Image: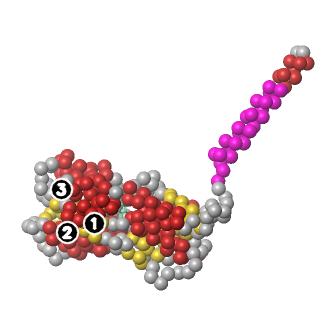
Amino acid sequence: MLPNNKLLLYTISALIFLTSFIGMLFYGYKTFYIETTSATSKDYTHHFALIAEETENDYWRLIEQGAKEAAVENDIYLEYVAPQKADNEQLLRLFDRMIAAKVDGIIVQGIEGERFVDLVHKAIERNIPIITIDTDVKSSERKAYIGTDNFYAGELAGKTIIENTTGEQYVGIITGRFDAINQQERISGFKEAIESHSRIKIVAEKESNITEIGATQATYALLKENPNINTLVGMSALDGIGMVDGLQEITPNKDMYITAFDVLPETLDLIQSNEIDATIAQYPEEMGFESVEVMIDLQKQDLLENQIFTDTGIMKKQDLPKIHGEMR
Ligand code: BGC
């Protein structure tokens, strides 16, 4: 090979090597880099984590919206994390990870079991305040609960049926998840409310897995197995919407009294079109907003009042015009 050609070959090889080396460094860094410095260090006063039940659930997105609003107002770095689909195991892992990341505070949906209580203890030992949101775990060392009084909300669902129906009512309950504490509390409140009304009887309960399609399938199965059901109660945010579809599929002309939960726009539309009779309103944006504000206070001192109930109420068609407009 002539010396000139050799030089060219070496130059090209060196260039290829350099390009690959730089590429490897760059992409390797992007793939494996884990943030080790706290996001609070420069631009933010604090770094809080909000751990939701499920990432894309509309109800949790409203909680996030409220929380983000308070975070922006107060220069807080707020990290929203959640399992893709509701899953206690994954939520516990995320919770543990956020403790390990040494955030300044964690706002988390309370979940059943000793492991949650242990994680709260672990966080408190490390000076990370914990707020339960939407669902409380009273036996834990959480610094505050912010959300609906779920037992009372369940009682309200019972009250709508007591006040707006006559004659024998055979109730089918669709609940988000049997192992969610807030769902258990709502069902207990519901049972207590109807206890002294012998004309109202619970026939069966099924899970929707907090999805619309799950509620549709559960409603279909409920009505197939129990054709006498003439009242449906949904206990979580997407149940009402799914119940209407399930009813359409199996017995579209049946006269059914339907109570839903939450005030997502689709639920309100179905109240407007008389397909849902009433819903129990919760205020997720308010929960999110307040939880961040309370977490800021907790950076300085513990609270005297640590159970902060947000509003809850029954909403029917006549209550819609004003509130429906505000919600959109
Ligand atoms: C409950 C949440 C649940 C959501 C599901 C709400 O009614 O309060 O715990 O995640 O419904 O869509």
Q: Residues within 10 Å of mark 2 (few under 14, many from 20)?
A: many
Select label 2 or label 3 by which is in front. 3
Give the x, y percent position of residue 228. Answer: 12, 58
Residue in view at x 74 percent, y 39 percent: 22
Disc 1 marks a residue whose amino acid type is Ile
Confirm or deny contact between disc 1 and disc 2 (CB under 8 A): yes
Q: What residue did someone put label 3 on?
A: 274
Which element type, helix, strand or loop, lies under badge 1? strand
Which of the marked residues, 2 or 3, is nearer the chain's N terminus?
A: 2
Q: Is residue 270 left or right of residue 121?
A: left
Give the x, y percent position of residue 132. Answer: 45, 70
Residue in view at x 19 percent, y 48 percent: 248
Q: Residues within 10 Å of mark 1 (few under 14, many from 20)?
A: many
Label annotation for residue 280: 1
The span from disc 1 to disc 2 (Cα, nearest Å) is 9 Å
Q: Is residue 88 left or right of residue 126?
A: left
Res. 104 image quadrant: bottom right
Magenta span contains residue 20: yes
Q: Which residues are magenta?
A: 11-34
Label annotation for residue 160: 2
Dividing the image into four quarters, tell me where ligand 1 lies: bottom left
Res. 171 image quadrant: bottom left
Which of the marked residues, 3 or 1, is nearer the chain's N terminus?
A: 3
- Residue 304 visible from this viewpoint: yes
